[in-house]
Amino acid sequence: AQSVTQPDIHITVSEGASLELRCNYSYGATPYLFWYVQSPGQGLQLLLKYFSGDTLVQGIKGFEAEFKRSQSSFNLRKPSVHWSDAAEYFCAVGPYNTDKLIFGTGTRLQVFP
Amino acid sequence: GAVVSQHPSRVICKSGTSVKIECRSLDFQATTMFWYRQFPKKSLMLMATSNEGSKATYEQGVEKDKFLINHASLTLSTLTVTSAHPEDSSFYICSATTGTSQWDEQFFGPGTRLTVL
């Protein structure tokens, strides 16, 4: 079945530590891939997206994500986390034969000083 | 940057009453607005796609008579939950885009928490 999986419901890191949030998808062909962040009291914001080309995508706020076709993954990374990065992160995929977005269930990031 | 507001941010109502939620794009004209529902610990579920001056397109399983959408202008869309019941309690989020699909960059509102007693 087609699906988007974010295996980690909740992640806690120390400020300054590196971060990797996982996202896996299950679709017949490579979909379009997105990462969104939902900060408390604010609307979702697009961090980055992958449509084609270079598999390492740079986004806003110092985030990057790497598309790995062999693993059907699009993991989000940041080398050094800031306290303001504490939020809910959503991976989303756009199946190539639709113009829809399918959101994952989210990963809540908590940052300790 | 592009800003989308929602009003109210939180509403509590009695079962059987109707509730209207407004979504406004404050500094741009939105070709398309989307309405989502977000359950606790769940992902966003698209309810409907709204274009100014035309009828909304509802996703499968969403009752159009229950969730009335009006898109009166390029900056305003409203969602009315009619005859609300406790199972309609949820977090409702709108987004707006100058594009036409969810793949285009969406600017999201902060959401409206609806509680039906």
Image (spheres, rainbow, N blue to C red):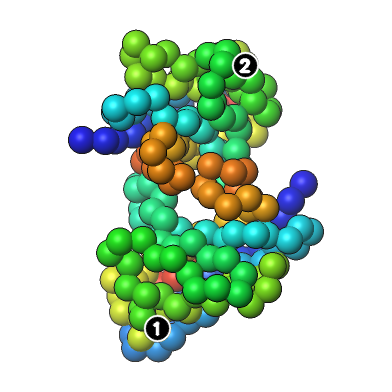
Q: Position of residue A101 (x, y in %)?
A: 44, 43
Label 2: how many Cα within 10 Å (few below 14, some 14–19, many 20+): few
Considering the image in quadrants, where does the C terminus of chain A appear?
top right
Q: Position of residue B112 (x, y in %)?
A: 52, 65
**How far is disc 2 from disc 1 in space, using C-alphas?**
47 Å
Q: Is residue B20 above or below residue B56?
A: below
- Identified at 67% across, 22% down, the residue is A62
Residue closer to the observer: A8 or B103: B103
Q: Secondary structure at mark 2?
A: loop
Q: Which residue is mark 1?
A: B82
For badge 1, the amino acid type reads Thr
Considering the image in quadrants, where does the N terminus of chain A appear?
top left
> In the orientation shown, which residue stands out farthest toward the front?
A97
The chain letter for the residue carrying disc 1 is B
Residue B40 is left or right of residue B101, and the answer is: left
Quarter residue A71 falls in: top left
The chain letter for the residue carrying disc 2 is A
Q: Is residue A87 visible?
A: no
- Identified at 63% across, 77% down, the residue is B72
Q: Position of residue A98 (x, y in %)?
A: 41, 43
Quarter residue A97 falls in: top left
Which of discs 2 and 1 lies nearer the camera? The answer is 1
Residue B98 is left or right of residue B115, and the answer is: right
Q: Position of residue A26 (x, y in %)?
A: 29, 28
Q: Is residue B75 visible?
A: yes
Residue closer to the observer: A36 or B52: B52
